[in-house]
Amino acid sequence: LKLAQDNESKLLYVLVPEESVLAAMAADNETTSLHNDDVHAIVDAEAPLAAKRKQSLYGTLPAIQAQPSAIPSVCWYILIVELCERLAFYTITGSQAFFLEHIGFGLSNSGALNATMWTLCTVLAVGASWTADVGLGRYSTILASGCIYVLGTVMAALSAMPGQESPRFYFLAVMGLLPVATAGIKANISNFGADQYDESDPAQAAGQERFFSIFYCSINMGAALAYGFFTTFASSGGLGVPKAWGYAAAYGAMACCMMTAVFIYRTGRSGYKVHPLQERSALAAVLGSLLEVSREGSRQAAVVTVGIFLLTVSIFLSALQSLVPSLGQGPMLMAFFAALIGTMAVVLPCRHPQWILSESSDNENARERRDVHDFLKLLPVLITGSIAFNALYNCMQFWYAQQACQMDVRVPVGTGTFQLSGSFFNIADCLAIVAITPLAVLFLDPALTRAFRGHFGHGEKFALGMVIATMSVMAAARLEVLRKGAPVLSETSNCAPPGVGMSDMKGAWMMLPFFLMGTAEIYTQPTLLHYAYSKSPASMRTLAMASSFFIAAVSSALFALLVSALGPYMPNDLNHGHLEYGYYINVAIGATFLLPAMSLLNDGCK
């Protein structure tokens, strides 16, 4: 935008990036170009120019923001798919550890297998980004993944039929088909929704940022239904379904849900904005550029290439350790060091990746190199931020429910009692997101923006979320200490390993750490999603989203290693262990990665 006198215009938009540029404006009566994304003031074009400059230089002016546009109608079809996919996913993963314990797996092995499934879902997102870029496109990738999802849930339901439980058939469904389907949807669906907005329109650009919060809210509406009803229904039955048939009936219902979602998604085909396929995938562009610059003698490019390879190896070794525990601690230790060295090898050179812009690049690939440069600059933020938050989030994802299962989860029903699943209390996490997201978007965020004088951006939001997440984990640790000090009831828990009793402490107390974690998610997950989308070039957006999930896979892999390392402290009966040690360790990991994440986020926003 340019500052110019216009006798016909009543208003003139003035960009105020920094005082040094404003000083140049004051000394120059001619047109001055400014480069900044934030409009800080609207001034009267008929007022004397010198007065306008003085007001801009020395006055504190409020930020002027376009009003967000309404959500496009086709985005509701996309949100329905995400809601149903998360409903199915969390129903299966939320009851998976209990189902595996039901068919004979131990508590530690069940948790590790559950973490491995999450790892597979996230790491396969990288392959899904290639499919969307040059294979099927985002729309068709999501559609095909939805169909695979239907097949996987049908197989899971058949494998859980009482008297005919088949671990092999179950693992083929939930460790084979569902990770592929989940990766195809998750790597593309939020970007596909954001694609429906016109970024050249300020109102739609503002609406696009709000879309990510609505998108994350739809995720948790599905999760609320899963944890609020279906995980308990799976482990205990209900509504006329015997307990023995609970898992099969719950998984069958998820198959019906996904079939409905695929049908609704297909009906909106004519209204979607569908981008053409790229000539070269973002994955190929990044890897090709890294290898080419490495051959030209760049040590930074070689280090990053080795780092990506090591991160991939760490995920593979982690999954191998969980699936074949007889291999001992060797794979666990190798995975840990591969993840640690790989993280440093990617983060450090990519803080300033100008080395990818080699002078030998011709005009044809100069733009591609620039896109690769911008993508690589995202990685340090995504890696440090994701590991920092996931260190805390994984405590909720894998431990809170197991802790709740050894608390008093009985509720009176008629003359008897009914036991809730430990995963039921995850509903507090979902309800916190669904209830607080509108309050945050409409009231809290604007108030904090005013309080911080317009500087409540990505970094500040993420830091706030991390503080609340830390409070959640510390609350869970305190509750665990209190639970172990309570008497053990004579009645055993339906969702704990066989023969393990409940402590005389109400499971409803676990809703507090769940609720706090849900509040934290509002300021962490959508923040990283929007940062990745808005800061990456259009050609790299699918890969940027997939990379977010790949990085989450690294953190899940590290968590699986932590579970294995803490195995002696986490026996089937937590009364004889120290689950709180795991909480304290994860808080320390989160704090360690938060500091560099904040520094990188602030640098990126500048």
Image: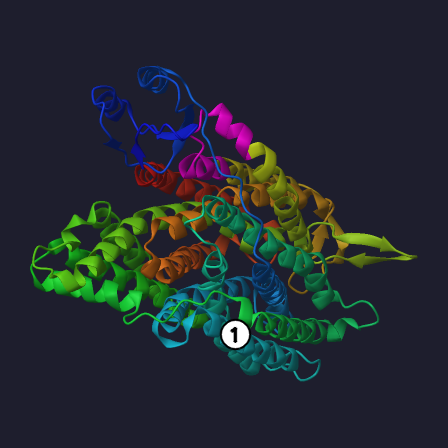
Magenta span includes 458: yes
Quadrant of the image for the C terminus? top left
Check disc 1 and give the amino acid type: Leu
**In-front residue for pair 158/473:** 158
x then y, percent, for residue 80 = 62, 63
Frontmost residue, 565 versus 586: 586
Residue 346, position in %: x, y? Answer: 25, 53
Would residue 580 be found to the left or right of residue 312 on screen? right
Residue 406, percent from left and from top: 67, 53
Q: Main secondary structure of the magenta part?
A: helix
Q: Which residue lies furthest to the front in this view?
A: 8
Query: Quick check: 576 above or below 150?
Result: above
- Which residue sits at x=50%, y=77%? 144
Q: Is residue 331 above or below residue 405?
A: below
> Residue 419 placed where, x, y %?
77, 58
Q: In which quarter of the image is residue 225?
A: bottom right
Report the residue marked by disc 1.
143
Residue extent of the magenta highlight: 445-466
